Amino acid sequence: MNAVIQLEDIHKVYHTGEVDVHAVRGVSAAIQTGEFVAIMGASGSGKSTLMNIIGCLDRATRGRYLLDGTDVSQLDRDDLADIRNEKIGFVFQGFNLLSRTSALENVELPMLYVHRHLPGREQRERALRALETVGLAERADHHPNQLSGGQQQRVAIARALVNQPALLLADEPTGNLDSQTSIEIMGVFQTLNQQGITIVMVTHELDIARYAKRNVIMRDGRIVSDVPVSDRLQAETELRRLRDAQQAVQLTV
Amino acid sequence: MMRIWATIKIAGRALRRNKLRTLLTMLGMIIGVGAVIAMVGIGNGAKAQIESQIASMGQNVIIVFSGSMTRSGIHTGWGGAGTLTIEDSEAIVREIPGVTVISPEIMSTAQVAAGNQNWFTRILGEGPDYFDIRQWPVVTGSPFTPQDVRGANKVAVVGQTIADQLYPGEDPLGQIVRVKNVPFIIVGVLKAKGLSVQGQDQDDLIIIPYTSAMKRVQRVTTLRTILVQAARPTLLNPVQQQIIELLRQRHKITPGKDDDFTVRNQQEIADMATAQSKTMTLLLGAIAGVSLVVGGIGIMNIMLVSVTERTREIGIRMAIGARGRDILLQFLIEAVTLSVIGGVVGIGAGVGVSQLLAAKMSWPTLISSTSVVYAFFFSAAVGIFFGFYPARKASRLDPIDALRYE
C-alpha cells in the first residue's frame, strides 16, 4: 500500500514551566493516497498538535512519522520548510492570504520558495491553472479585501495546490464561513479528492466531517475512534437541498 | 539568484506600501550621508586651499620669526618681540652657504590716502627678492630695486584691491599714495591672488622697501621676520640649523637658555596647517557621522515595527515553505534598500549643499570620488548592521506562533 502519512507511536510533550503537558500520547495511524480524512475532537484533545506535527510545523517528541515515504521525525527547521513547500498544501481557518497582494500573486507565493526555480511566465500559468481549478480564474487580479470569505478560501486552496503537494491539510477550513459557503468549500474538497488529492481536515463540526470519507476522533491525546463515514454527505445534493429550503421560506425568488 | 531577485521585488513592494514611513526613514539616512559628504567636502576644500597657499609661499622657504614660542615660559608668539635686526639678515646671507635670497620683513596696518580716496590696509616692508621668493609677479610696472632699499626710497608696489579702490578707472602707475602722510610713488601692481582660506583678501596690501617701512612709516629698528630661501630642498635642514646657531651666537644666548627667535621651514608650516585642517575634517566628519548613526537607528526602529506588524505574513511564508534564511534575506534587503537609496539621495544632497556653499558663501569645497564611494558602501553597511537584528528576529519566529499572531 502507498501511505501518504504513516504515524508510529507519536508523542508530544510541552514543557511549560514546572508542569509537562502531554498533548499527544501515542498516536499511530496511516492515511493512504486518495483518502479524505476528518480529524475531530474537543479543544484540548490534541488534534491541533497532531495537525501541526502532520503539517511539519512542529516535531514530535517521540515516535516516527513518514510523509510520502520520507522520515521527517528528525529533520531540522530548514528541511521541514522544504518538506512543507514540496509536499504539503495548507488551508487555514482565517484564510491567511497576504493583504494588498492580488489573488494571483498569493497563489504564486509557494513557487517563490521552490528550490528549482520556475521562469516567471510558467509560474503565472501554473497559478492561473490552480485558480481555474477552484473556479476563480476571472478574479485573479482581485485583492483579498475585494473578495468574499468563500472566495478568499478558494484562493487559499489554489495556493495550497499550486506546488502539486502529496497532501492537502486543512485546519478548520469552514470555521469563518456561513453554512452555505461551507458546503461550497466542501464541494471543492470533494471534487479535488475525486481527482485523487489526499485531504486531511481538522474540524469540530460534525456535519462538516460527514463530507469526508473517514472520521478520526481524538480525546486526551489519543485516537478513540477511527471509522469510515457511512452516511456521507455530497456537497452537490446538500446545496440543492439548501436552496430548495431557502426558496420555501422565500429567502430567494 | 532568481530567489534573490524575487526577494528584492518583495522588499520593494513592502517599502512602497508605506510610502510616508519609507520616506521618513530614508530621510534619516539622507541627512546623515548628506551631512558627511558636505562636511568632508568642506574639510577637504579647506585642506586643498591651505596646501595651495603653502605652495604659493615659494620653494624651499625658511622663515625666521622674532620672538620665541616659549621665552622664559611666557608665550610671546611669533614676531612678538623685536629681536631681529637688519644686521642679522645680512649676516645670514653672508655667512651661511646654500642661502640664495633673503627678504627682511616688517608689517603694519595703516590708513592710506590717494587724492580724495582713502583705505585701511596692510603695509608690508620687504626686500626686492620678496616677489621671487613668494612667486608673486608684478604684472604692471616693475618691482622696486636694491637701490630703492638702500636709499629707503618712497616707492610702493600695490595689490589689485588697492589699485581698484584708490584709483578706480585710472592707471595707478606713477600715482602718489600717502601712507601715514608719507607720499610713495606706485611703481608696480601685483598679480591678483583672491581670498585666502580665512577669507582674507590677499590683494589688499601695499609693499614698500623694508628700509622705508622702518625709517619712514613705522620708525622702528627691528624686523618682524626674515624670509630665507635655500638653494635646494635638501639644504633646508642644514640651513635651518645654521641659522639657529648663527643667531644664538649673534644674540649672545648662552647654552641652556631659550632662543629669542623661532625658525620654521615651509614643510613644518605646511605640516601644521594640514594637521589642523585634518583635525577639522575629522571633527566635522565625526559630527556628521553621529547623524548617520541616528539614521541607522531609525532604520532599525522601523524594521522592528515592520517585523512585529508582519508577524502573520512571516508565519504564512514559513508555513508554505520559506526557510529562516529566506525571511532573513527579505528583511535585510528591505533595510539595505532603505539605507542605500537614502545613501544615494544623501550623496546627491551632500554634493548639492557643498556646491551651494561654494557658490553662495565662497567656501572652498572639494568632493572626492573616494568619499562618494565610501559613503555609498558605508550606507549599505549601515543597512546591514542595523537591519540584521530585526531580520534575524523575524527569521527565528516559530511558524505556529507567527500564524496565530493577531
Image (tube, rainbow, N blue to C red):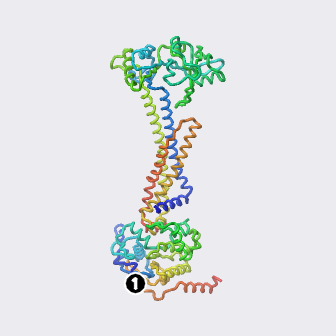
Considering every residue shown, the one lying at the far front of the view is: B232
Q: x%, y% of residue B8?
A: 49, 59
Considering every residue shown, the one lying at the far bottom of the view is: A230
Count of residue discs: 1
Q: x%, y% of residue B224?
A: 47, 19
- Residue A52 seen in the figure: yes
* Quarter of the figure with the N terminus of chain B: bottom left
- Residue B76 seen in the figure: no
Considering every residue shown, the one lying at the far top of the view is: B151
Sort mark 1 into few (<14), some (14-19) or many (20+) by Cα contacts within 10 Å. few
In the picture, measured across the screen, residue B203 lies left or right of residue B387, that is right
| Residue closer to the observer: B184 or A15 | B184
The picture quadrant where one finds residue B354 is: top right
Whether residue B361 is situated above or below residue A214 in the rendered picture? above
* Residue of label 1: A225
The picture quadrant where one finds residue B238 is: top left
- For badge 1, the amino acid type reads Ser
| Residue closer to the observer: A176 or B366 | B366
Q: x%, y% of residue B277?
A: 47, 35
Whether residue B303 is situated above or below residue B202 in the rendered picture? below
Tag 1 secondary structure: strand
The picture quadrant where one finds residue A198 is: bottom left
Disc 1: host chain: A
| Residue closer to the observer: A111 or B187 | B187
Q: x%, y% of residue B254?
A: 34, 16
